[in-house]
């Protein structure tokens, strides 16, 4: 993975191997969304639909955790080697704050 600081933000350039787990998880979520649409069209039991939504939410949370992990990992490496360590730390904190807001 390559990272650089642009406008006091960490920009990540992921290679194909680093994108693969993210894209696989997102493909699973797409399948879950299609499944939920079918359930609604078929007038399935509400609890089944809610369970599908909970599964989708958990899957998206895992995608977010992978993204955060990559960002924090690169940020930690950059903070030790960059002349702009303050910008790196600020950006990592901004990402973590945004992630915590989604859980409220």
Image: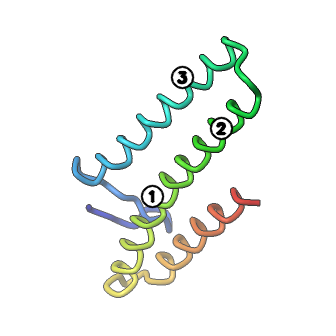
**Quarter placement of the N terminus:** bottom left
Q: Which residue is mark 2?
A: 53
**Residue for point 36% across, 41% down:** 23
Q: Is residue 60 above or below residue 42?
A: below
CA separation in Å, label 1 and label 2: 21 Å
Picture quarter containing residue 2? bottom left
Question: Camera-side residue: 69 or 15?
Answer: 69
Which dot, 3 or 1, sits closer to the camera?
3
Q: Tag 2, which secondary structure?
A: helix
Q: Name the spot of residue 48 as percent of width and height, x first.
A: 68, 31
Q: Which residue is mark 1?
A: 67
Crowd band around label 1 with a 10 angstrom C-alpha radius: few (<14), some (14–19), many (20+):
some
- Which sits earlier in the primary sequence, circle 3 or circle 1? 3
Question: Camera-side residue: 33 or 51?
Answer: 51
- Which sits earlier in the primary sequence, circle 2 or circle 3? 3
CA separation in Å, label 2 and label 3: 11 Å
Picture quarter containing residue 46? top right
Q: Is residue 103 above or below residue 74?
A: above
**Residue for point 50% across, 55% down:** 62
Q: Which residue is mark 3?
A: 34
Q: Tag 3, which secondary structure?
A: helix
Q: Name the spot of residue 85 as percent of width and height, x first.
A: 44, 83
Tell whether label 3 touches label 2 (CB within 8 Å): no
């Amino acid at each position: 993975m390559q990272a650089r600081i642009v406008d006091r933000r960490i920009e990540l350039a992921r290679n194909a191997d680093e994108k693969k787990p993210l894209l696989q998880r997102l493909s699973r979520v797409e399948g879950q969304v299609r499944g939920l649409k079918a359930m609604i069209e078929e007038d399935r039991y509400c609890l089944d639909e809610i369970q599908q939504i909970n599964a989708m939410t958990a899957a998206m949370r895992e995608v977010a955790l992978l993204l955060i992990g990559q960002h924090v990992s690169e940020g930690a490496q950059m903070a030790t080697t960059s002349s702009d360590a303050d910008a790196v730390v600020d950006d990592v904190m901004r990402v973590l704050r945004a992630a915590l807001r989604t859980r409220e």
